Amino acid sequence: MSHRSAVALAVSAALAGGMFATSDVHAQQRAAGLEEIVVTARKREESLQEIPLSITAFSGEQIRELGARNISELSDFTPGYSFEAFGGRRGAEGDVSRPVIRGMSNILGEGNASIFVDGIVYSESFLSFPFDIVERIEVIKGPQAAQFGRATFSGAINVVTKRGTNEFENRVTGRIAQDSDYEINLSSRGPLIEDRLFYFIHGRYYEYGGEYRNEIGDQRIVGSEESWGLNSGLEWLVNDDVSLRFTLGYNRDDDDVPAQRLQDRFANNCFLDQARQYFCGEVQKFDSVRLATDRLGSEAGLDRRVLRTTGALEWDLAGSGFLLTANTGIVSARTSFGNDNSYLGDPIFFAGGQFVRVEDSERDEWSTELRLSSPATEALRYSVGVYYYDRTLERLRRVPETTTIVTDFGRDRIKNSAVFGSLDYDITDQLTAGLELRYQKDEISNRTATGAINAADFTGTLPRFTLNYQYSDDLLIYGSIARGNKPGAINPDPRITENFRTAEEEKSWNYEIGVKSDLLDSRLRLNAAVYWIDWTQQQLTQSAEFDDIPISLITNAGKTRVRGFELEASYLLSEQWSVGASYALADATFREFCDPIQGAELTGFDCVSSVTGAPGGDVSGNQTPISPKHQATATSTFTQPLSSELDLFLRADYSFQSKKYSQVHNLAYVGDRHLLNLKLGVRADAWDVTLFVDNVLDDRTPSTVVRFADLGNLNIGPNENPAQDNVPGTTAVERGFLVPLPRSRRAGITFSYNF
């Protein structure tokens, strides 16, 4: 089947989709219309269709029906949002997961959007978080500092986990698929004391065998993954006014080296007369890797342990409707990751160490928030609160199975304190104005291995103004203006010179107008938004040579503009057939950016950086890297009753992402990606069985690409050999491009049973 045929099939099956993503067919049949979705994006329960924010929300059941097992797979079906699983489940450099919302991307450093689990920030890689414990995921677009705090520059992902209920529910879910892909989940929840004390407990085991062969050594398959975890929760309704909730979660990952391949220097096809050379066009697709896994010994791959604890209080003060909430959480992670960072399988050494190495990290973070909210039934509603966050991160690189340190990045620390509040006023029965405001201070520091301290403080006053008009019960029109900021960053590598030690904070103003509507007796849902973002001092990854070694670091661009449009829609054609589709445009382009490090090699010295004052190459007008300009989805679910207790269902889900550039020069890129998933299943009240085929088109387009270096011709020290150059005499280290190898077509079966 061609891509064009697949698109035609999917679009003909689906005309619209927003909460499109996974319609709960049973709920639709009962309600004879699209279900109402309740979200907590503003820290209180509100109908999705009545909140003046752009949100895509998925219930836990919807996620399971979609077949998404991690946040990266879920992002494929969320307009205006992408999440790279680069480097396997380790995440990107430094184990930081980087959601991209509305084209606001970055490669190194903290992400521009953050993930929150039960109100607590979760900075560790989220790729192995168990979705079976999720009650709901909300992708909230636009700056969310007023409600969620720091590192929500482009948005926030709000994850709500399951809670106990008055009804006992025991459940087992599982998956068996090709490439030794297995998963089993066991959960139970219910009352310990009816109406007062509830519990939730969950256990998970997951295994994946990998599919790509290593050309080096014993030709074994690489990329395997293994996880197990335990999660639990306890909720106590002390009385009619006070409730307490505690959660505890532990997850262990034991993965092989991820399947990644370097497109080497011999593929370079442009700027061959420049020092580093370059590749122009769509990067290659590979069916194998070249990794020196034997020299990693027992430390090949990822070993990660994550412990998560939270505690929450809700207190309706004397039954007055004034609600006092307190929320505290701790996330602790220990990670060891051994990999061949040359991605060539060659025994490459340099004066400071070797590229086959292990990275160890210890991350500890805790946060606490106290908030007082007025009664939600009044025309004037307000809340005030205080917040504190503290995170430490220690990282080093060492030789495998030794204590020999290659690079010690020292100890990073972030302390954030804030006061915040919100005010909403119903001007009329239909018109409401809102103001949210947060004042925060960020203190960041890096203590080097020698004891030296690099530190910087950043403060920000972050407002959001909203105005929403409830034209009718089924139509909301809203507008918002929001200020966003992202604190600065420190480049901790001790080899980096002082003038590149610190990156400045980012700032933005965001303007949005949207409409939300339920039409045709709530059988058609249409939500749309247009937005404009003025973005200054964007933090970007650049590469420079220090002591003849290529090192990545964070620098600032000048000005960036993002213009975008999002459309989501769902339609119930009948009680048995639901369809949907979505489209997102994120036109994110540099307005002013003089690249002082590499732009001159590719464009010539034609500008002076307004940030550093250094001459460089002008890349204004180019698209931001690692972000698709276009995204589209379509879905169709058809259900046929077989008996009064048994249904047959057929489901198709299609997603499209346009090409992504590796860097600001817009030369190398990954091509358009088409994903089509099909499911056929049988469902009863207590069980279901589903046959599925993921990636029906077997699209092997990589999800992303990172500009890298081909270290095979590192012409210094014992490796000095200019004859290894692709173009002799150009440089010691020529360009390469690193791509993750995607999962191919896969068939399998899922099942669930409630008892």
Image (tube, grey):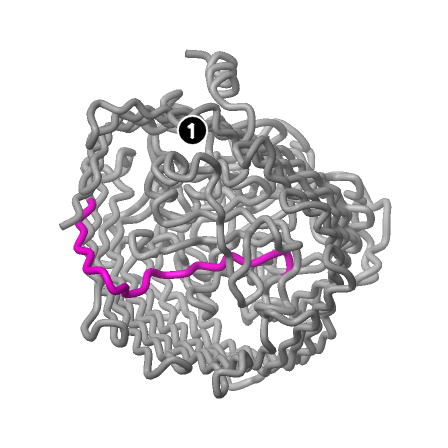
The secondary structure type at the circle numbered 1 is: strand
Specify few, some or many for label 1: CA neighbours under 10 Å numbering under 14, 14-19, or 20 or more: many
Residue at image location 48% in from the left, 24% down from the top: 573
Residue at screen point 73% across, 68% down: 425
Query: What amino acid does circle 1 point to?
Result: Asp
Query: Closest to the observer: 22 or 332?
Result: 22
When the figure is inspected, residue 393 is found, relative to residue 136, above or below; the finding is below
Please identify the quadrant where the N terminus is shown: top left
Report if residue 729 is visible in the image.
no
Asked where in the image residue 308 lies, by quadrant, the reply is: bottom left
Image location of residue 113, percent across then percent down = 57, 58
Q: Which residues are magenta?
A: 153-173
Residue at 47% across, 19% down: 13
Q: Is residue 173 above or below residue 614?
A: above
Residue 106 location (% of width, % of height)? 60, 53
In the rendered image, residue 344 lying in the magenta stretch gets the answer no
In this rendered view, identify the residue nearer to me: 192 or 98. 192
Q: Residue at x 66, y 75 (%)?
A: 382
* Residue to which mark 1 is pinned: 653
Answer left or right for 113 relative to 449.
Answer: right
What is the residue that sits farthest to the left in this orientation? 755
Asked whether residue 162 is drawn in magenta, I would say: yes
